Image: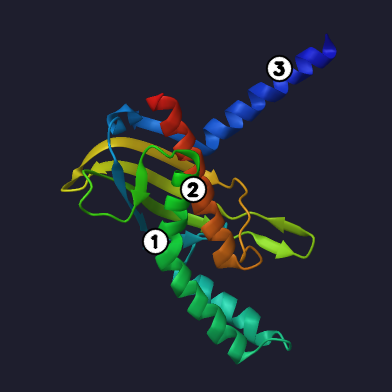
């Protein structure tokens, strides 16, 4: 009996935990029924970072100082790092789409402004996580995912809240901050894809 109660408690806590990280706060994903494709966008502007809520400029200044002060790295390493950071910022949308397409295959999620609807990720806050050899902490994302009419962005059909969303997905650059953030977007796409699948079945 004790084992059964513990199992029920664990399942309940897992469900609450998942709901706490990603929650539909308005609308119904059923609106996507019969849609062959959906446009995807990620906004990464005026984002705050870390528990201190610093700006991206401040975060990058701190990161640059850490890299330059490391005798094994230096200016060349920083140039490479900041270059990859800017590239990944443009590619986060691709990771989000990859996650969506992984878990729901009846709709094609991609950058396609001709699609009737758009899934827009508005990123408000990011914790980039860390990597220390055999141990690591995933990145966390707070913000909103909105399903909007592509030609009328003010028309919000569904709103999903991300609250320090941090579900794990591995990728080739997970050891780097931008890689862990990319993984968080891909994971958010996967979980949202599952919600879409449940809504449309």
Query: Which quadrant of the figure contains the N terminus?
Result: top right
Instruction: Report, in whole angstroms, how far the alpha carbon at label 1 lies from the one at label 2.
Output: 18 Å
Q: Residue at x 36, y 47 (%)?
A: 109
- Per the image, the residue denoted by label 3 is 8
- Per the image, the residue denoted by label 2 is 99
| Residue 181: mark in rendering | none
Q: Quadrant of residue 175?
A: bottom right
Residue 10: image location, x then y, percent: 71, 24
Mark 3 element type = helix
Question: Going from the N terminus, do you reach mark 3 or mark 2 first?
Answer: 3
Residue 129: image location, x then y, percent: 63, 59
Q: Where is 89 relative to 61, above or below?
A: above
Q: Residue at x 15, y 48 (%)?
A: 151
Which is closer to the viewer, label 3 or label 2?
2
| Residue 44: mark in rendering | 1
| Left or right relative to 197: residue 115 | left
């Amino acid at each position: 009996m004790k084992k059964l109660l513990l199992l029920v408690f664990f399942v309940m806590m897992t469900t609450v935990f998942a709901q706490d990280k990603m929650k539909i706060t308005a609308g119904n994903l059923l609106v996507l029924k019969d849609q062959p494709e959906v446009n995807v966008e990620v906004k990464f502007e005026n984002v705050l970072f870390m528990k201190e809520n610093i700006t991206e400029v401040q975060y990058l200044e701190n990161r640059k100082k850490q890299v330059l002060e490391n005798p094994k790295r230096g200016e060349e390493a920083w140039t490479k790092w900041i270059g990859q950071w800017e590239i990944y910022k443009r590619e986060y949308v691709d990771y989000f789409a990859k996650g969506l397409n992984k878990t729901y295959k009846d709709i094609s999620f991609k950058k396609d402004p001709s699609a009737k609807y758009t899934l827009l990720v508005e990123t408000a806050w990011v914790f980039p996580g860390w990597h220390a050899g055999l141990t690591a902490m995933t990145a966390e994302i707070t913000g909103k995912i909105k399903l909007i009419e592509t030609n009328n962005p003010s028309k919000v059909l569904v709103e999903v809240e991300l609250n320090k969303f941090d579900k794990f997905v591995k990728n080739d650059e997970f050891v780097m901050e931008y890689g862990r953030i990319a993984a968080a977007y891909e994971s958010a796409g996967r979980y949202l894809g599952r919600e879409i699948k449940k809504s449309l079945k």
